[in-house]
Image (tube, rainbow, N blue to C red):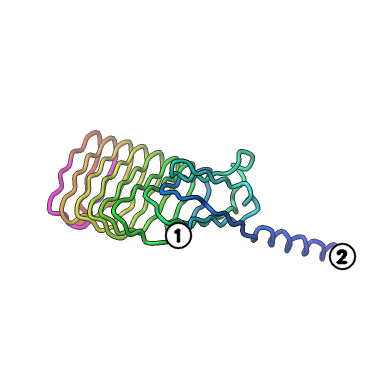
Amino acid sequence: MKKYIFILFFLGFGFINAQELTQDLEDFNEIKVYNGLDVVLEQANSNKAYITGRNRTDVKFKIKNGILKVRMSIDEILDNDNTKIRIQFKNLERIDARQNASIEVKSKLKQDNLYLNASEGADVFANVKLDNLYVDSNTGGVVEAEGKTRNQEIAINTGGKFYAKNLRSEHVDIKIKAGGAADITASEQVKARVRAGGTVNVYGNPKTIDENTLFGGKVIRKN
């Protein structure tokens, strides 16, 4: 009898965790995610969030001045391991992950400009087709991008990383310091300012590389 009770309890617990909470969202064009949450972004005709996991009701959404902030309630910040969030959006120009959060953009973003930021151990992944990409990665944050863009403007600091070997571009302007690292691809020009142990690996055999290194900074041409 105890065995059957345990099985029923286990199945019921799994069912509760699998239930999905849906929330409509107002218009936004920027997203910031905190508290180690995992978020998948999908482009759609509406703005909506889908949340699963035992603590799904503790996920908080706040929109102000076009910025959507996603975080856990104070009581559940350290207990979000099985919380999964899928957000549909109509338009998105800035993506910002902080505090060990993880953001993956499932849709290929085709637009003029995009800003990606990762800090405090968080990570962001995006597949893009752009004119201009702006990236800020610091304090252990990781940004990964692939696809195509005409121009890149990159700032990396304090152990931040930018993986973009599979992101084709023409021009890259990159600044790295304090142990940051990057893989970039350019066909025309790279302007690199690398300080204090930072490293940039340059792919794509660009026609010109304008480099300035100091205190152990490195610019390495890979092909």
Q: According to the image, label 1 marks what residue? A: 42
- Amino acid at dot 1: Glu
Residue 179, how many percent across, how many down? 33, 39
- Amino acid at dot 2: Met
Question: Magenta residues, as a range?
Answer: 197-211
Residue 101, how many percent across, how many down? 49, 47
**SS category of the residue bearing label 2:** loop
In this view, 220 is above or below 15: above
Say which residue appears at 54% left-offset and 44% top-offset. 71
Magenta-drawn stretch, dominant element (helix, strand or loop): strand
Q: According to the image, label 2 marks what residue? A: 1
The crowd level at tag 1 (other Cα within 10 Å; few <14, some 14-19, many 20+) is some
Q: CA distance from mark 2 to mark 1?
A: 46 Å
Residue 222, how many percent across, how many down? 22, 54
Q: In front: 87, or 207?
A: 87
Residue 113, how many percent across, how many down? 30, 51
The crowd level at tag 2 (other Cα within 10 Å; few <14, some 14-19, many 20+) is few
Q: In front: 76, or 138?
A: 76
Q: Is residue 113 magenta?
A: no
Say which residue appears at 36% left-offset and 58% top-offset. 109
